[in-house]
Each structure stands twice: as C-alpha cells, then as structure tokens.
Image (cartoon, helix red, strand yellow):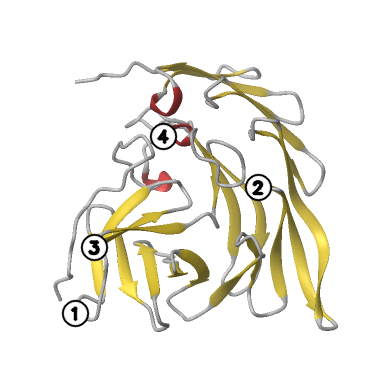
Amino acid sequence: EPHDDAPDQAKNPNGDAADCVPNTCKNGCPVSMVTGEELLTLTDAVLDGVLPFEFTRLYRSSAVEIDSGLGFGWSHTLAHRLAFDGDGVIWIDHENRRTRFPLPDAARPAIHNSLSRAAIFLGDEPEELILALAGDSARFYHFRAGRLTAISDAHGNRLTLQRDRSDRVQRLHNGAGRALLLRYDRSQLVAVDYQVFAQDKWATEQNLASYSFDARQRLLVATNAIGDSEHYDYDDHHVILQRQLTGGASFFWEWERAGKAARCVRHWASFSQMNTRYVWNDE
C-alpha cells in the first residue's frame, strides 16, 4: 500500500542535513563524518518496565545557541516539541533536529517523510499529533498544542508526562508505580530521581543524576548515581573543548569555524593513542 509521502530532509540547527545520531557515520568517535559536528551521547537514567525508557543527553555542537534546560548545546530524550509554520509542522526532536511535515488533517491523517524516515499521524484525542521515527523499536511521541504528553509503543504500552506550573516536564511515569522525576533550579534541570508510588504518593527512591551550571547557563558537571562526575569546558561560543572523567582521563577537541558552524579538526584523549585528525572538503 503506497504511503502519503512528503519527503523533506531533517536538519541540524546549522541548517545542514542530519540523519538521527545512531545512523550517522561516526568513525569510531562521536564526530559526524558528514557535518563535522560533535555528537556526544550519554545515558544518565533508566525507567524500567514493559516500555523501558532511557534518559539520555546529547551534546550537539551545532546546537550551541540552544538551551533545552541542560545548558547550551545539550538536549535530552524528553526535550521534544512541535512548532507550527503556516500549513506545516516542524518536529524539534531530542537530538535538536528539525523535521518538517505538512499538517495532517482528516483528509491526510497519516503522512510519511521518506527522506527523514519519519511519520506524523492524527491522534485519537482532540488536537493530538503523533510523531514517529522508523525503526525496529519504534516509539510514538504524542503531542498536544506542540507539547509532548506521552510516549507509546506499537503494543499500546505508554509512558505519561506530567508538567509543573512552568510547563516543564516534571515526571515521566509508566502507569505501574515507577517514574523519573525531573527537578529544576529556575530554568536549569538540576537532577533526575527514580520514584515509586506507594501509600497514595510518589516517593524518591534514588537520585540517578545531578547537574551543575556556570553563570552563562553552561553544563559544567554531571554526576551519576554512585557519585562519579564528568566535567566539561567550552569556548566563548559554548563549543566543547574538554570532557574530564572521574578518574582524571580527559577527551579534547580542536575546531575550525566558530559557533554552530564549527567542525572538529582534531579529537584526542589524555590516556591512550587516540588522536584523530579531520580534513573537511567544502566542495
């Protein structure tokens, strides 16, 4: 059966065509062989259950002008939103990619985007739109008024988002008494906790991740459940220069061009023979 197809290539914040991170050729280290940008992916928390969920953050150097709550350049797996543009809708996903679709309606309830391997559907609820990327473990992202409200799978399992008074994601729960709680300090996400529902209320069982920032809203330190920390350093445009692990090992980056257009020309580590250089062809 032919699909209603509206092909449009997803783009990164610099306007470059960008496939999803798992499909991007990375040559053994997290630098895109297509755009030269850094794609550092780190999983900080997991919600177990029939529909497991990983809270993962991504540093994307083309997103250095964007702060999704984790500091400039960083996004996370709950940082989805929709933007409406005339008769179209733009999905800004957890990787800070922009994928454009025509706005579905009763005459076009399901529209595929073959170039971006994604699809948009009219939902069952009023004003609900559902977005999905193609894949073996397809996840369906449910939106109302441009805001992410739930995540489901093909078997009807569902994770529900609750928001605080400032409209930020506060809790992701699985309907079976397990949740991730997101805590904030002003506009910044400072912690992710694992919660259980007992005796008619949510109770925190464990802190899984915590984050601290500098005065320029840049992520400086990320600490995991056992107290191990990573430290980050950036240039004046928020482009990453160094990642230091708990044991003292460090990764370093050297760049050409500035800000969101930066391309990595060297990526090396303090602890090994890792020393990769990149030469970019502009033709």
Closer to the camera: disc 2 or disc 1?
A: 2
Q: Residue at x 48, y 52 (%)?
A: 94
Q: Is residue 276 visible?
A: no
Amino acid under disc 4 = Lys
When the figure is inspected, residue 268 is found, relative to residue 114, above or below; the finding is above
Which residue is tagged 1?
107
Instruction: Say which mark, if any, is on residue 87.
Output: 3
Closer to the camera: disc 4 or disc 2?
A: 2
Amino acid under disc 2 = Ser
Quarter-of-image position of residue 247: top right
Q: Secondary structure at mark 2?
A: loop
Q: Position of residue 28 (x, y in %)?
A: 46, 32
Labels 4 and 1 touching (C-beta < 8 A): no
Labels 3 and 2 touching (C-beta < 8 A): no
**In the rendered view of the protein, which quadrant contains the C terminus?**
top left
Residue extending farthest left: 2
Mark with earlier residue (4, 2): 4
Q: Position of residue 142 (x, y in %)?
A: 45, 71
Q: Position of residue 141 (x, y in %)?
A: 45, 67
Q: Secondary structure at mark 1?
A: loop
